[in-house]
Image (cartoon, grey):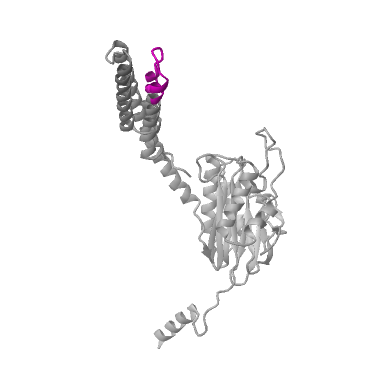
Amino acid sequence: MGSATARPSRLVRWAVPVVLGLLVAALDWYQGGPGVQYPGTLVAVPLLAATLGGPFTTAGAGVVALLLSHGIAVAESLRSGYQPYSSAAMTRLTIIAVITLVAVVASWHRTRRERSAGQVAAVADAAQLAILEPPPRRIGGLRCASAYRSATQLARIGGDLVAVVETRQGVRALVGDVQGKGLDAVRLAGYVLGSFRERAHDDLELDELAGALDTTVRRASLGQEVFVTATLVQVDGATGSLEAVSCGHPAPFLVSPGAGRARPLAVEPGPPLGLLELTGPPVALRTRLEVHDRLVLVTDGLLEARRPRLLSRSPAGPFVDAEALLAEHLADGSLSRGLDGVVRGATQWSRGRLRDDLAVLVLERPAAERLPPGAAHPSTGDERAASTSHR
Protein backbone atom coordinates (compact mmCIF):
# COMPACT_ATOMS: atom_id res chain seq x y z
CA MET A 1 0.00 0.00 0.00
CA GLY A 2 1.38 3.33 -0.96
CA SER A 3 2.18 5.91 1.64
CA ALA A 4 -0.32 8.63 2.21
CA THR A 5 2.51 11.17 2.19
CA ALA A 6 4.12 9.96 -1.02
CA ARG A 7 5.26 12.96 -3.10
CA PRO A 8 7.29 13.49 -6.27
CA SER A 9 11.05 13.59 -5.93
CA ARG A 10 12.80 16.83 -5.06
CA LEU A 11 14.06 17.17 -8.62
CA VAL A 12 10.53 16.93 -9.99
CA ARG A 13 9.14 19.37 -7.41
CA TRP A 14 11.68 21.99 -8.46
CA ALA A 15 12.02 21.24 -12.15
CA VAL A 16 8.35 21.21 -13.19
CA PRO A 17 7.53 24.80 -12.04
CA VAL A 18 10.82 26.12 -13.48
CA VAL A 19 10.17 24.44 -16.83
CA LEU A 20 6.69 25.96 -16.90
CA GLY A 21 8.14 29.41 -16.25
CA LEU A 22 10.75 28.98 -19.00
CA LEU A 23 8.05 27.86 -21.44
CA VAL A 24 6.05 31.01 -20.68
CA ALA A 25 9.17 33.15 -21.23
CA ALA A 26 9.94 31.41 -24.54
CA LEU A 27 6.33 31.77 -25.67
CA ASP A 28 6.41 35.48 -24.91
CA TRP A 29 9.71 35.98 -26.74
CA TYR A 30 8.67 34.19 -29.92
CA GLN A 31 4.92 34.78 -29.98
CA GLY A 32 4.41 37.86 -27.83
CA GLY A 33 3.50 41.25 -29.11
CA PRO A 34 2.25 44.66 -27.97
CA GLY A 35 -1.25 43.38 -27.19
CA VAL A 36 -0.30 39.98 -25.75
CA GLN A 37 0.43 39.54 -22.03
CA TYR A 38 1.99 36.08 -21.68
CA PRO A 39 3.98 37.02 -18.54
CA GLY A 40 0.71 37.25 -16.61
CA THR A 41 0.43 33.46 -16.78
CA LEU A 42 3.53 33.18 -14.61
CA VAL A 43 1.19 33.18 -11.58
CA ALA A 44 0.67 29.51 -12.42
CA VAL A 45 4.28 28.73 -11.47
CA PRO A 46 3.92 29.11 -7.65
CA LEU A 47 0.44 27.58 -7.77
CA LEU A 48 1.83 24.50 -9.50
CA ALA A 49 4.71 24.33 -7.01
CA ALA A 50 2.20 24.44 -4.13
CA THR A 51 0.59 21.22 -5.38
CA LEU A 52 3.93 19.41 -5.71
CA GLY A 53 6.17 20.58 -2.87
CA GLY A 54 6.31 22.34 0.45
CA PRO A 55 6.39 26.01 1.44
CA PHE A 56 10.09 26.48 0.62
CA THR A 57 9.68 24.99 -2.85
CA THR A 58 6.63 27.19 -3.44
CA ALA A 59 8.46 30.31 -2.28
CA GLY A 60 11.40 29.46 -4.53
CA ALA A 61 9.08 28.98 -7.48
CA GLY A 62 7.52 32.38 -6.74
CA VAL A 63 10.96 34.02 -6.80
CA VAL A 64 11.66 32.33 -10.14
CA ALA A 65 8.35 33.66 -11.48
CA LEU A 66 9.18 37.20 -10.33
CA LEU A 67 12.64 37.07 -11.93
CA LEU A 68 11.25 35.69 -15.19
CA SER A 69 8.51 38.34 -15.29
CA HIS A 70 11.00 41.14 -14.78
CA GLY A 71 13.45 39.54 -17.23
CA ILE A 72 10.74 39.33 -19.89
CA ALA A 73 9.98 43.02 -19.36
CA VAL A 74 13.66 43.97 -19.69
CA ALA A 75 14.07 41.82 -22.80
CA GLU A 76 10.95 43.36 -24.34
CA SER A 77 12.35 46.85 -23.73
CA LEU A 78 15.42 45.96 -25.81
CA ARG A 79 13.43 45.18 -28.94
CA SER A 80 10.56 47.66 -28.48
CA GLY A 81 9.66 50.75 -26.55
CA TYR A 82 8.28 48.81 -23.59
CA GLN A 83 9.02 50.29 -20.13
CA PRO A 84 10.12 47.55 -17.66
CA TYR A 85 9.21 49.77 -14.67
CA SER A 86 5.85 50.91 -15.89
CA SER A 87 2.76 50.70 -13.72
CA ALA A 88 1.53 47.65 -15.69
CA ALA A 89 4.83 45.80 -15.17
CA MET A 90 4.94 46.62 -11.46
CA THR A 91 1.29 45.59 -11.05
CA ARG A 92 2.09 42.23 -12.65
CA LEU A 93 5.00 41.72 -10.25
CA THR A 94 2.78 42.62 -7.30
CA ILE A 95 0.12 40.12 -8.37
CA ILE A 96 2.72 37.35 -8.73
CA ALA A 97 4.10 38.16 -5.26
CA VAL A 98 0.64 38.08 -3.66
CA ILE A 99 -0.26 34.81 -5.40
CA THR A 100 3.06 33.35 -4.23
CA LEU A 101 2.27 34.28 -0.62
CA VAL A 102 -1.16 32.64 -0.89
CA ALA A 103 0.39 29.54 -2.47
CA VAL A 104 2.98 29.28 0.33
CA VAL A 105 0.25 29.35 3.00
CA ALA A 106 -1.79 26.76 1.08
CA SER A 107 1.25 24.53 0.68
CA TRP A 108 2.01 24.76 4.40
CA HIS A 109 -1.53 23.64 5.31
CA ARG A 110 -1.39 20.82 2.74
CA THR A 111 1.90 19.45 4.04
CA ARG A 112 0.58 19.53 7.61
CA ARG A 113 -2.48 17.52 6.60
CA GLU A 114 -0.32 15.06 4.67
CA ARG A 115 1.99 14.58 7.64
CA SER A 116 -0.96 13.95 9.96
CA ALA A 117 -2.54 11.55 7.46
CA GLY A 118 0.78 9.74 7.11
CA GLN A 119 1.03 9.19 10.87
CA VAL A 120 -2.53 7.86 11.01
CA ALA A 121 -1.84 5.58 8.03
CA ALA A 122 1.33 4.24 9.66
CA VAL A 123 -0.53 3.39 12.88
CA ALA A 124 -3.39 1.80 10.93
CA ASP A 125 -0.95 -0.18 8.82
CA ALA A 126 0.80 -1.54 11.91
CA ALA A 127 -2.55 -2.44 13.50
CA GLN A 128 -3.71 -4.23 10.36
CA LEU A 129 -0.49 -6.21 10.12
CA ALA A 130 -0.86 -7.22 13.77
CA ILE A 131 -4.31 -8.61 12.99
CA LEU A 132 -3.38 -10.27 9.70
CA GLU A 133 0.03 -11.75 10.47
CA PRO A 134 1.68 -13.03 7.28
CA PRO A 135 2.28 -16.80 7.38
CA PRO A 136 5.85 -18.13 7.25
CA ARG A 137 7.27 -19.53 4.03
CA ARG A 138 7.84 -22.93 5.61
CA ILE A 139 5.82 -24.40 8.45
CA GLY A 140 5.48 -27.95 9.74
CA GLY A 141 7.22 -29.48 6.73
CA LEU A 142 5.06 -27.56 4.25
CA ARG A 143 5.70 -24.65 1.94
CA CYS A 144 3.28 -21.80 2.49
CA ALA A 145 2.31 -18.57 0.76
CA SER A 146 -0.65 -16.21 0.87
CA ALA A 147 -2.02 -13.21 -1.00
CA TYR A 148 -4.57 -10.68 0.21
CA ARG A 149 -6.21 -7.77 -1.52
CA SER A 150 -8.77 -5.59 0.24
CA ALA A 151 -11.64 -4.15 -1.75
CA THR A 152 -11.56 -1.08 0.53
CA GLN A 153 -9.34 1.70 -0.74
CA LEU A 154 -6.19 2.35 1.35
CA ALA A 155 -6.90 -0.67 3.57
CA ARG A 156 -4.58 -3.64 3.91
CA ILE A 157 -7.22 -5.94 5.31
CA GLY A 158 -10.99 -6.16 5.18
CA GLY A 159 -13.40 -8.87 6.22
CA ASP A 160 -11.41 -11.86 4.92
CA LEU A 161 -9.42 -14.10 7.27
CA VAL A 162 -6.13 -15.91 6.71
CA ALA A 163 -4.15 -17.66 9.44
CA VAL A 164 -1.73 -20.60 9.66
CA VAL A 165 -0.33 -22.19 12.83
CA GLU A 166 1.77 -25.27 13.56
CA THR A 167 0.35 -27.54 16.26
CA ARG A 168 0.92 -31.04 17.62
CA GLN A 169 -1.81 -32.32 15.33
CA GLY A 170 -0.16 -30.78 12.27
CA VAL A 171 -0.38 -27.52 10.38
CA ARG A 172 -3.78 -25.91 10.86
CA ALA A 173 -5.02 -23.17 8.55
CA LEU A 174 -8.06 -20.93 8.43
CA VAL A 175 -9.45 -18.96 5.51
CA GLY A 176 -12.77 -17.20 5.97
CA ASP A 177 -15.02 -14.29 5.10
CA VAL A 178 -16.91 -12.08 7.55
CA GLN A 179 -20.42 -11.00 6.64
CA GLY A 180 -20.51 -7.31 5.77
CA LYS A 181 -17.77 -4.76 5.23
CA GLY A 182 -16.08 -1.86 6.99
CA LEU A 183 -14.74 -1.54 10.54
CA ASP A 184 -17.31 -3.93 12.03
CA ALA A 185 -16.10 -6.68 9.69
CA VAL A 186 -12.48 -5.95 10.57
CA ARG A 187 -13.31 -6.06 14.30
CA LEU A 188 -15.02 -9.44 14.02
CA ALA A 189 -12.20 -10.75 11.83
CA GLY A 190 -9.74 -9.81 14.57
CA TYR A 191 -11.75 -11.74 17.17
CA VAL A 192 -11.94 -14.87 15.02
CA LEU A 193 -8.25 -14.78 14.09
CA GLY A 194 -7.20 -14.35 17.71
CA SER A 195 -9.45 -17.19 18.83
CA PHE A 196 -8.15 -19.48 16.08
CA ARG A 197 -4.49 -18.83 16.89
CA GLU A 198 -5.15 -19.64 20.55
CA ARG A 199 -7.58 -22.57 20.29
CA ALA A 200 -5.80 -24.30 17.37
CA HIS A 201 -3.19 -25.54 19.86
CA ASP A 202 -5.80 -27.15 22.10
CA ASP A 203 -6.43 -30.89 21.93
CA LEU A 204 -9.50 -30.46 19.73
CA GLU A 205 -10.59 -32.23 16.60
CA LEU A 206 -11.06 -30.00 13.56
CA ASP A 207 -14.85 -30.02 13.84
CA GLU A 208 -14.56 -29.21 17.55
CA LEU A 209 -12.27 -26.30 16.70
CA ALA A 210 -14.97 -25.04 14.33
CA GLY A 211 -17.41 -25.23 17.24
CA ALA A 212 -15.07 -23.15 19.42
CA LEU A 213 -14.82 -20.50 16.69
CA ASP A 214 -18.61 -20.55 16.36
CA THR A 215 -18.84 -19.63 20.04
CA THR A 216 -16.38 -16.79 19.48
CA VAL A 217 -18.48 -15.36 16.64
CA ARG A 218 -21.69 -15.51 18.69
CA ARG A 219 -20.05 -13.80 21.66
CA ALA A 220 -18.36 -11.12 19.53
CA SER A 221 -21.48 -10.34 17.52
CA LEU A 222 -22.97 -8.47 20.52
CA GLY A 223 -26.45 -9.81 19.82
CA GLN A 224 -26.42 -8.97 16.13
CA GLU A 225 -27.20 -11.58 13.51
CA VAL A 226 -23.82 -11.90 11.82
CA PHE A 227 -21.89 -14.90 10.63
CA VAL A 228 -18.50 -15.88 9.25
CA THR A 229 -17.95 -18.40 6.47
CA ALA A 230 -14.74 -20.35 6.96
CA THR A 231 -12.71 -23.33 5.80
CA LEU A 232 -10.45 -25.13 8.28
CA VAL A 233 -7.77 -27.56 7.17
CA GLN A 234 -5.22 -29.71 9.00
CA VAL A 235 -2.22 -31.15 7.17
CA ASP A 236 0.51 -33.46 8.45
CA GLY A 237 3.62 -32.42 6.56
CA ALA A 238 5.30 -35.80 7.07
CA THR A 239 2.50 -38.18 6.08
CA GLY A 240 0.33 -35.91 3.94
CA SER A 241 -2.75 -36.67 6.03
CA LEU A 242 -5.34 -33.97 5.25
CA GLU A 243 -8.54 -32.99 7.00
CA ALA A 244 -10.88 -30.24 5.86
CA VAL A 245 -14.01 -28.65 7.33
CA SER A 246 -16.24 -26.15 5.51
CA CYS A 247 -18.52 -23.76 7.39
CA GLY A 248 -20.51 -22.27 4.55
CA HIS A 249 -17.31 -21.47 2.66
CA PRO A 250 -16.03 -22.53 -0.79
CA ALA A 251 -14.21 -25.86 -0.75
CA PRO A 252 -10.40 -25.94 -1.00
CA PHE A 253 -8.79 -26.77 -4.33
CA LEU A 254 -6.05 -29.26 -5.13
CA VAL A 255 -3.58 -28.31 -7.85
CA SER A 256 -1.31 -31.12 -9.06
CA PRO A 257 1.88 -30.60 -11.12
CA GLY A 258 1.05 -30.13 -14.79
CA ALA A 259 -2.71 -30.07 -14.18
CA GLY A 260 -4.87 -28.07 -16.54
CA ARG A 261 -7.50 -27.29 -13.91
CA ALA A 262 -7.68 -27.16 -10.14
CA ARG A 263 -9.82 -29.83 -8.47
CA PRO A 264 -12.18 -28.84 -5.62
CA LEU A 265 -12.24 -31.14 -2.61
CA ALA A 266 -15.53 -32.95 -2.01
CA VAL A 267 -15.99 -31.48 1.46
CA GLU A 268 -19.56 -31.29 2.74
CA PRO A 269 -20.36 -27.67 3.66
CA GLY A 270 -21.98 -26.92 7.01
CA PRO A 271 -23.55 -23.70 8.30
CA PRO A 272 -21.34 -20.62 8.74
CA LEU A 273 -19.68 -19.84 12.05
CA GLY A 274 -22.23 -18.23 14.32
CA LEU A 275 -24.98 -20.57 13.11
CA LEU A 276 -23.57 -24.00 13.98
CA GLU A 277 -25.90 -24.33 16.96
CA LEU A 278 -28.70 -24.88 14.45
CA THR A 279 -27.27 -28.12 13.04
CA GLY A 280 -24.17 -29.00 15.06
CA PRO A 281 -20.55 -29.19 13.88
CA PRO A 282 -19.80 -29.83 10.19
CA VAL A 283 -18.51 -33.13 8.83
CA ALA A 284 -14.75 -33.35 8.32
CA LEU A 285 -13.33 -34.68 5.05
CA ARG A 286 -10.27 -36.92 5.43
CA THR A 287 -7.98 -37.44 2.48
CA ARG A 288 -4.30 -37.15 1.57
CA LEU A 289 -2.07 -34.43 0.18
CA GLU A 290 0.42 -36.02 -2.18
CA VAL A 291 4.00 -34.85 -2.62
CA HIS A 292 4.21 -31.69 -4.79
CA ASP A 293 0.43 -31.22 -4.64
CA ARG A 294 -0.74 -27.78 -3.63
CA LEU A 295 -3.75 -27.15 -1.42
CA VAL A 296 -5.37 -23.80 -2.28
CA LEU A 297 -7.88 -22.05 -0.02
CA VAL A 298 -9.71 -19.03 -1.47
CA THR A 299 -12.49 -16.57 -0.67
CA ASP A 300 -15.40 -15.31 -2.75
CA GLY A 301 -13.36 -12.35 -3.96
CA LEU A 302 -11.61 -14.69 -6.38
CA LEU A 303 -14.51 -16.96 -7.31
CA GLU A 304 -16.93 -14.07 -7.89
CA ALA A 305 -14.61 -11.83 -9.93
CA ARG A 306 -16.73 -10.84 -12.93
CA ARG A 307 -15.95 -9.06 -16.18
CA PRO A 308 -17.97 -5.83 -16.42
CA ARG A 309 -20.05 -5.19 -19.48
CA LEU A 310 -18.56 -2.89 -22.09
CA LEU A 311 -19.06 0.81 -21.26
CA SER A 312 -20.75 -0.14 -18.00
CA ARG A 313 -19.70 -0.23 -14.35
CA SER A 314 -22.10 -3.08 -13.61
CA PRO A 315 -20.28 -6.40 -12.99
CA ALA A 316 -22.83 -8.36 -15.01
CA GLY A 317 -20.40 -10.20 -17.27
CA PRO A 318 -19.08 -13.77 -16.96
CA PHE A 319 -17.32 -15.03 -13.84
CA VAL A 320 -13.61 -15.79 -13.94
CA ASP A 321 -12.69 -19.44 -14.53
CA ALA A 322 -11.08 -19.86 -11.12
CA GLU A 323 -10.12 -23.52 -11.62
CA ALA A 324 -8.23 -22.74 -14.83
CA LEU A 325 -6.68 -19.60 -13.34
CA LEU A 326 -5.36 -21.46 -10.29
CA ALA A 327 -3.92 -24.27 -12.40
CA GLU A 328 -2.33 -21.85 -14.85
CA HIS A 329 -0.30 -20.07 -12.19
CA LEU A 330 0.08 -22.65 -9.38
CA ALA A 331 0.54 -25.98 -11.15
CA ASP A 332 4.29 -25.35 -11.33
CA GLY A 333 6.88 -22.78 -10.33
CA SER A 334 7.26 -20.47 -7.37
CA LEU A 335 4.38 -20.10 -4.93
CA SER A 336 4.83 -16.35 -4.53
CA ARG A 337 5.03 -15.67 -8.26
CA GLY A 338 2.08 -17.99 -8.83
CA LEU A 339 -0.04 -16.11 -6.29
CA ASP A 340 0.92 -12.81 -7.90
CA GLY A 341 -0.29 -14.24 -11.19
CA VAL A 342 -3.60 -15.37 -9.66
CA VAL A 343 -4.33 -11.95 -8.15
CA ARG A 344 -3.24 -10.19 -11.32
CA GLY A 345 -5.38 -12.49 -13.46
CA ALA A 346 -8.50 -11.92 -11.33
CA THR A 347 -7.89 -8.16 -11.33
CA GLN A 348 -7.43 -8.04 -15.09
CA TRP A 349 -10.52 -10.18 -15.65
CA SER A 350 -12.63 -7.74 -13.61
CA ARG A 351 -10.82 -4.78 -15.23
CA GLY A 352 -9.60 -3.61 -11.86
CA ARG A 353 -13.07 -3.60 -10.28
CA LEU A 354 -12.95 -6.32 -7.66
CA ARG A 355 -16.11 -5.91 -5.60
CA ASP A 356 -15.06 -8.10 -2.66
CA ASP A 357 -11.93 -8.78 -0.61
CA LEU A 358 -9.71 -11.45 -2.12
CA ALA A 359 -7.63 -13.90 -0.11
CA VAL A 360 -5.69 -16.95 -1.30
CA LEU A 361 -3.62 -19.36 0.81
CA VAL A 362 -1.46 -22.14 -0.65
CA LEU A 363 0.07 -25.08 1.22
CA GLU A 364 2.45 -27.37 -0.66
CA ARG A 365 3.89 -30.68 0.47
CA PRO A 366 7.45 -30.78 -0.89
CA ALA A 367 9.51 -33.88 -1.45
CA ALA A 368 11.55 -35.11 1.51
CA GLU A 369 15.02 -33.61 1.58
CA ARG A 370 17.74 -36.08 0.70
CA LEU A 371 20.84 -36.01 2.87
CA PRO A 372 24.33 -36.69 1.45
CA PRO A 373 25.76 -40.20 2.01
CA GLY A 374 27.12 -40.53 5.52
CA ALA A 375 25.41 -37.38 6.78
CA ALA A 376 23.48 -37.74 9.99
CA HIS A 377 19.87 -36.71 10.26
CA PRO A 378 19.52 -33.59 12.43
CA SER A 379 17.50 -35.50 14.99
CA THR A 380 20.23 -38.15 15.16
CA GLY A 381 22.72 -35.57 16.35
CA ASP A 382 20.32 -34.43 19.05
CA GLU A 383 19.74 -38.00 20.18
CA ARG A 384 23.51 -38.63 20.34
CA ALA A 385 24.03 -35.47 22.36
CA ALA A 386 21.29 -36.50 24.76
CA SER A 387 22.75 -40.01 25.02
CA THR A 388 26.19 -38.59 25.77
CA SER A 389 24.84 -36.35 28.51
CA HIS A 390 23.37 -39.39 30.30
CA ARG A 391 26.66 -41.24 30.31
Q: Does 93 sit left or right of 335 as displayed?
A: left
Q: Quadrant of residue 232?
A: bottom right
Magenta highlight range: 26-43
Q: Quadrant of residue 261?
A: bottom right
Q: Does 178 sit left or right of 134 as displayed?
A: right
Any part of residue 214 in sight: no
Please report the residue visible at 70 percent of the width from the left and 50 percent of the height from the top.
Answer: 321
Relative depth, front residue between 145 and 75: 75
Quadrant (top left/top right/bottom left/bottom right) for the C terminus = bottom left
Give the image location of residue 265, x and y in percent.
Answer: 70, 59
Give the image location of residue 386, x and y in percent.
Answer: 43, 82
Residue, far top: 87
Q: Is residue 169 magenta?
A: no
Any part of residue 9 in sight: yes
Q: Is residue 35 magenta?
A: yes
What secondary structure predominates along the stretch shown in magenta? helix
Q: In the rendered picture of this protein, how many numbered marks are placed on residues?
A: 0
Residue, far front: 79
Q: Quadrant of residue 20?
A: top left
Residue, far bottom: 391
Please report the residue visible at 36 percent of the width from the left and 39 percent of the height from the top.
Answer: 11
